[in-house]
Amino acid sequence: MVIGGSQAGLAIGYHLAQRGLSFVILDAGPEIGHAWRSRWDSLRLFTPAQYSSLPGMAFPSPMDTYPSKDDVASYLQTYASAFDLPIKLNARVTSLTKRGSGYLVTIADEELMANHVVVATGPFQVPFVPPMGDELDETVRQIHSADYRNPAQLPDGHVLVVGGGNSGFQIAEELAATRKVDLAVGKRVPSLPQRLLGKDLFWWLSGVGFMKVSTDSRLGRKLSERDVLIGSSARRLRRSGVTIRRRLTSAVGRRASFEDGSDQDVDAIVWATGYRPDFAWIDVLDVKGASDRIVHRRGVTDAPGLFFVGLTWQHTRGSALIGFVNDDAAFIAGRIDPHLENRAGRVGRDSERT
């Protein structure tokens, strides 16, 4: 049983199908690609089309073009249909528990059994908003980047974007075309150009072996602790009219205060402050560590038959990227015992109950 039907879930599904194994993909959304269609309107991948393919099917866009979020959603739908992957939609999993030698998966009022479970829910789970947001005046419009779609959602006036990652930089630049925008950055994040000497960044990263550097190495572990801006930079943002601020330290009433002692009255705040993992629904021993983090080695846990795919830096920088998740998906599929997996499919069908 695969939990999650976005790129990671479809990639593992492809490899399970290629091995002739019996499985089903459970997805909480009403359609494949729903999570992508729910992102902000102007979002585009920072991987070009030729580095955005799932196994077995090239992304249907010209080389060196950057697919939109709707392009990605449509591709995922086409992919699932082309390989006839067994998917159950509107199937939000509410709990996963050990039951005998297998696992009990609960979906609303339905319970399913499987001998193997692959969790492929991805890195974007629960939007995180700092508690200081509670101190803001109710007239200040607050929105997390997960709910941001376009500038029309925000009032005219001064907008503060909080968060120095790719989302924060991209949203701040978009808003700067129509509003006065400040961007609060907690720490400096190194930036890389989208293109260098006529080639896309990922041509270089793949060519020098960066995308293969794993967390098994000292370098990989160090890299996994740092974020990198791709195609954005503080210099570019300043040219767009954005004021770069230091870390936001407090937000009371309508006033935002920053680490360097400066402050600014704001009319709206976009919290591009990332996500936190939410695996509270998994009640299995020896799987979770501090702060609800999954304990694994390249997606393999100490719980027999329980695997993960699509986690950030699960093994390499590409583990959570659409065009690079294939390696981890193939690895996990190879770790699933074919004989047990076929039997798990029969047990799952025979054990369904409401």
Image (cartoon, helix red, strand yellow):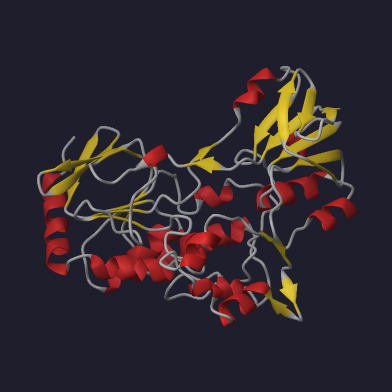
Give above or below for 327 relative to 110. below
Q: Position of residue 14 (x, y in %)?
A: 35, 68
| The N terminus: image quadrant | bottom left
* Position of residue 263 in the picture relative to residue 119 (left or right): right
Q: Position of residue 113 (x, y in %)?
A: 17, 46
Q: Quadrant of residue 296?
A: bottom left
Give above or below for 142 relative to 110. above
Residue in the image at 54% along x and 42% along y: 275
Q: Position of residue 165 (x, y in %)?
A: 66, 50
In the rendered image, is residue 332 in sight?
Answer: yes
* Position of residue 300 in the picture relative to residue 125 (left or right): left
| Front residue (pair 326, 288) | 288
Query: How many numbered tags mark residues here?
Result: 0
In the rendered image, is residue 84 in sight?
Answer: no
Residue in the image at 60% along x and 25% along y: 131
Residue at the front extreme?
A: 218
Q: Position of residue 79 (x, y in %)?
A: 44, 66
| Front residue (pair 348, 320) | 320
Residue in the image at 69% along x and 59% along y: 190
Residue in the image at 40% along x and 71% along y: 327
* Position of residue 187 in the picture relative to residue 123 (left or right): right
| The C terminus: image quadrant | top left
Give above or below for 275 relative to 254. below
Q: Quadrant of residue 60?
A: bottom right
